Amino acid sequence: MAATDTITVREAEDRDLPAVTAIYNEAVVNTVAVWNDDTVDVDNRRTWLAEHRRPGTLALVAVDAEDAVLGYATYGSFRAYDGFRDTVENSIYVDGTRRAGGVGTALMTELISRARDEGKHVMVAAVESGNEASLRLHRKVGFTQVGQLPEVGTKFGRRLGMTLLEIIL
């Protein structure tokens, strides 16, 4: 468990699922960070959490002094082929009212540390190309841009590009 001021980062637990669900659904409804159109329920996130408890995966939450979930971050397989076993892809979501307050940095710092400790070699991020806040966060913690995929997604009636970033762990 890592703490930064009043932000503590720890592994996600079942009791965090209602808050994680709310944060995810807010991103689905209001942002292009998630390229899904449909919100999910707690049972969906329970399955998601079980998948992120398998070896080679991780789900972390950032909480405040009252243990309220401020955001979450994960890593999991980048690709399903054996040759990618040392590469993971990350995801990070912060409560809409807590963005730009250090939550993302705390989550990413711990996520990277845990991946290194697990012996992973590369972490990849796929970020919507117009999401400047996420791109800045990834660069701040050491990611570099390695690719651009214009117009590979759609949401809210718009074509979206994807920026690929990586950090060598």
Image (tube, helix red, strand yellow):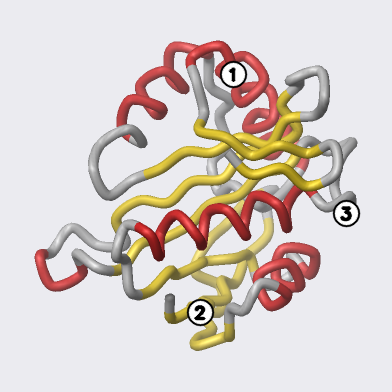
Q: Residue at x 56, y 18 (%)?
A: 17
The answer for how far apart the CA atoms under marks 2 and 3 are is 26 Å
Q: Is residue 7 left or right of residue 10?
A: right
Q: Identity of the amino acid at label 2?
A: Leu
The one of 89 and 44 positioned closer to us in this rendering = 89
Q: Identity of the amino acid at label 1?
A: Asp
Q: Is residue 167 left or right of residue 100?
A: left
Q: Closer to the observer: label 2 or label 1? A: 1
Residue behind mark 2? 149
The quadrant holding residue 51 is: top left
Give the quadrant of the C terminus: bottom left
N-terminal of the two: label 3 or label 1? Answer: 1
Residue 100: which disc?
A: 3
Q: Is residue 89 left or right of residue 145?
A: left
Q: Secondary structure at mark 3?
A: loop
Residue behind mark 1? 16
Q: Are marks 3 and 1 in contact (CB under 8 Å)?
A: no
